[in-house]
Amino acid sequence: MHILDDPDLSPRLRALLTRAERAPAMSAEQIRDLARTRTPSGSEAPAPSAAIEAMVRFEERYGGLWYPLLGSNGMEHGLRGEPTVRPGPHGWSFGGILDGDATWALDVLLDGRTAMTLAGRPRLINSGIAQRLEAHAQVARVRYWPHVTMGFAVGPGRTPTAAGIGFPPLDVEATGPAGTWWGDGESAVHLELHTWWGSEDLWIARCFAREAGRLASMAESVRQGVTGGAWREEHWCIWCSDSRRSMQPCLPESPTGLPAADH
């Protein structure tokens, strides 16, 4: 079943997809007829059956899906007429997602995980497409709440340790290898991988609250609760496309006409 036809989506995901569009997808027959593997040298061969069936499942569920998130480019899903799989460091993958906000492609692994390669460094991003969508639904939910942005640096390939003490409850459905969410109806914390191709990996911690007066205490809890690296000053808020003084809250104004995304 295509996700836009699924009646059992979470309320926040349903709210995210109210602005979604759907383009024609490839049929299972087309995928099976055209599926190929491509090696780094450029040679082609028939695709393994497991890879073919993974592409069929992906296209049936997500093919043609488009929705906006932070900007106007949107998130594009689909094989786009090219059911081609490639070997890589995490196994076989195919190109199935274009991240409009990052203006970069993600590879989809046969088990549904996603990976992004920047500066020649591949990194696992999502544990599955369902997790990716729930994370985006949470982004949309708190997009216009007051928030504070902080930077946290760790060694290459490492992940910060978060005790979660003083945080809202862990949001398991939205959490993946490159981003952890905690949230409830009044506040949220987001710890997200930002860059991973230099001498250190930079993660961004964001605190959100319906009431801006709660942000200072939330930020202090996060600074105490996240360990395994060093805090860095962060002046740029990519969500607001604006520069701020270190620890200065962003107070975005919500545009009218957007659907509510609460649970």
Image (cartoon, rainbow, N blue to C red):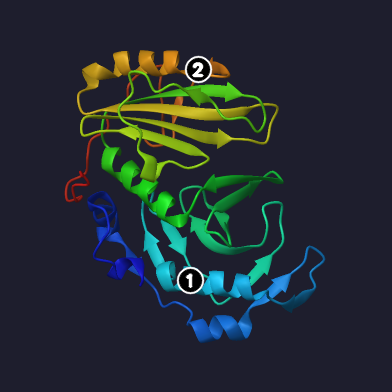
Image quarter for residue 35?
bottom right
Where residue 122 appears, x then y in whole percent? 66, 46
Looking at the picture, tell me which residue is in the foreground, 188 or 252: 188
**Amino acid type shown at disc 2:** Glu
Residue under the image location 45 percent in, 62 percent down:
76
The image shows residue 107, relative to residue 207, as above or below, that is below
Image quarter for residue 222?
top left
Residue under the image location 37 percent in, 45 percent down:
173
Q: In the drawing, does residue 29 fall left or right of residue 38?
A: left
Q: In the drawing, does residue 208 fall left or right of residue 113?
A: left
Sequence-earlier tag: 2 or 1? 1
Q: Which mark is residue 136?
A: none
Where residue 39 appears, x then y in whole percent? 77, 66
Q: In the drawing, does residue 25 fall left or right of residue 215?
A: right
Dot 1, crowdedness within 10 Å: few (<14), some or many (≥20)? some
Contact between marks 2 and 1 (CB within 8 A): the answer is no
The image shows residue 198, relative to residue 84, as above or below, that is above
Looking at the picture, tell me which residue is in the foreground, 164 or 208: 164
Q: Which mark is residue 57?
A: 1
Residue under the image location 39 percent in, 66 percent down:
65
Residue 52 shows in this picture: yes
Q: Which mark is residue 233?
A: 2
Q: Secondary structure at mark 2?
A: loop
Image quarter for residue 145?
top left
